[in-house]
Image: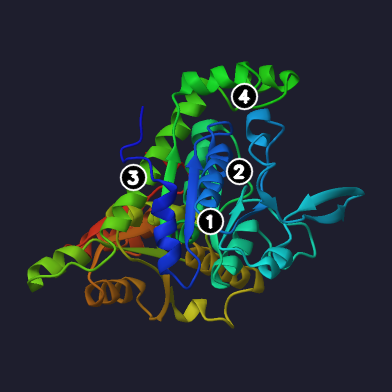
């Protein structure tokens, strides 16, 4: 299957580079190792170099693939830093050296990578943000399973728990997003031919992550995510025209309601992020502080959990709001009306059934009282994959 849009040329990215003071970001996304992200990055670097662009390699991981490694010798590689970690010396991208070199374009691979202790930033994508802020343009790559909002879907679809993630807010900063797509059969054939992993790892890979069903799910996620990224880019500006048109554009806004006590809030946030992405709209995460949830009324662990979820929401691209009210439903609906919310997302109540029947369940009250909104009640115990 081919990409829905024509293949972006090196010249397309070059035009963006020449127009910008802050660095521009181009991302190659794939659904699995071996689809050709790093190879294509290096191909583009050679094309830019031929046009006289000052391009360097900040960090590239060839994984021992000969075809990929063959594209490195004619490119300038910024020296890596040597870091001793748990008795082993590893090589990491040197953010300081890339900043000091200050090229027009830097290639940075494996963006979800966790930097070793003592590094300035926890993850490599944060290093990239520093490069962009310094006016350095970046071409980077990662696999779709590392996208934070897809974390639950990937685990349920493949059984693989992805520990290193990239927030959706980073993807939304990209000026160009390119999906590297292959059929599942072609990718498995590349694996069997020894073009992805060493021979001794091939049988294990085919029996686990590279199973046909797993790859099919991941490929579908990658195609959908890039399609939504393209749609977000083409509708980046507010709708103009009469007031009726503007209202249609904003009424699809999404609001996610969170509480201080749920350990499954990250799952709810990822659901809200995906919904907002599909509608190409703003979204809010709202916490209503009742008298019983004031800072001096809840314990330190619940406060820590709440703060962590608020930071996670910001990373996913939400605007976070803290309201104070004795009645959470009243506060939620007032906010929804004043901010043109179209969709209210809330987790299924954990209260006993008899309390819900007495009308104290927030989800059930929202269903009854939020007649002008779409209310989505999410089962946090068993999130569906679609």
Q: How far, Cα to Cα, is label 1 from label 3?
A: 32 Å
Q: CA distance from mark 3 to mark 4?
A: 28 Å
N-terminal of the two: label 3 or label 4?
4
- Residue occupied by mark 4: 208
Q: Dot 1 corresponds to which residue?
A: 52
Q: Quadrant of residue 13?
A: bottom left
Instruction: Kindly identify which residue carries mark 3.
Output: 227
Q: Earlier in the sequence, mark 1 or mark 3?
A: 1
Mark sitting on residue 23: none
User: What SS does tag 2 mark?
Assistant: loop
Q: Residue at x 62, y 16 (%)?
A: 193
Location of residue 95 with respect to 9 vertically, above or below: below
* Residue at image point 68% right, 52% down: 76
Would you call the spot at circle 2 few (<14 residues within 10 Å), some (14-19), or many (20 or more)?
some
| Disc 1 crowd, CA 10 A, few/some/many (<14, 14-19, 20+) | few
User: Of marks 3 and 2, which one's residue comes earlier in the chain?
Assistant: 2
Q: Which of pointers 3 and 4 indicates the residue nearer the eye?
A: 3
Q: Nearer the viewer, mark 1 or mark 2?
A: 1
* Residue 162 marker: 2
On the image, the x and y values in percent for residue 61 come to 68, 42
Task: Tell me the quarter of the picture where residue 356 sits.
Answer: bottom left
> Quick one: 284 or 367, which is closer to the camera?
284
Left or right: 360, with 146 as reference point = left
Q: From the image, state whether disc 4 or disc 1 is nearer to you.
A: 1
Cα–Cα gap, marks 1 and 2: 39 Å
């Amino acid at each position: 299957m081919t990409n829905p849009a024509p293949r972006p040329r090196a010249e397309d990215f070059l035009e963006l580079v020449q127009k910008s003071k802050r660095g521009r970001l181009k991302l190659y996304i794939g659904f699995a190792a071996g689809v050709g992200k790093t190879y294509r990055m290096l191909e583009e670097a050679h094309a830019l170099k031929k046009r006289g662009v000052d391009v360097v390699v900040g960090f590239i991981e060839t994984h021992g693939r000969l075809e990929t490694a063959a594209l490195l010798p004619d490119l300038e590689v910024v020296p890596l830093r040597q870091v001793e970690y748990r008795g082993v010396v590893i090589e990491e991208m040197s953010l300081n050296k890339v900043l000091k070199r200050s090229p027009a374009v830097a290639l940075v691979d494996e963006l979800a990578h966790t930097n070793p202790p003592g590094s300035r930033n926890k993850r490599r994508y944060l290093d990239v943000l520093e490069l962009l802020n310094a006016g350095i343009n970046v071409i980077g790559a990662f696999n779709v399973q590392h996208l934070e909002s897809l974390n639950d879907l990937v685990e349920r679809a493949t059984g693989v728990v992805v520990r290193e993630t990239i927030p959706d807010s980073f993807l939304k900063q990209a000026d160009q997003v390119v999906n590297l797509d292959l059929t599942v059969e072609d990718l498995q054939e590349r694996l069997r031919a020894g073009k992805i992993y060493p021979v001794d790892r091939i049988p294990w890979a085919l029996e686990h992550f590279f199973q046909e069903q797993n790859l099919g799910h991941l490929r579908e996620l990658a195609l959908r995510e890039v399609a939504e990224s393209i749609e977000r880019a083409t509708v980046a500006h507010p709708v103009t025209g009469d007031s009726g048109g503007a209202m249609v554009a904003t009424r699809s806004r999404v609001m996610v309601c969170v509480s201080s006590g749920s350990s499954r809030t990250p799952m709810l946030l990822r659901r809200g992020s995906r919904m907002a992405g599909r509608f190409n709209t703003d979204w809010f995460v709202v916490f209503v502080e009742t008298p019983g949830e004031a800072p001096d009324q809840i314990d330190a662990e619940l406060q820590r959990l709440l703060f962590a979820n608020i930071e996670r929401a910001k990373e996913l691209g939400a605007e976070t709001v803290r309201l104070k009210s004795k009645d959470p439903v009243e506060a939620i609906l007032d906010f929804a009306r004043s901010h043109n919310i179209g969709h209210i997302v809330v987790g299924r109540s954990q209260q006993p059934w008899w309390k819900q029947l007495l009308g104290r369940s927030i989800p059930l009250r929202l269903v009854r009282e939020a007649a002008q909104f779409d209310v989505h009640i999410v089962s946090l115990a068993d999130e569906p994959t679609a």
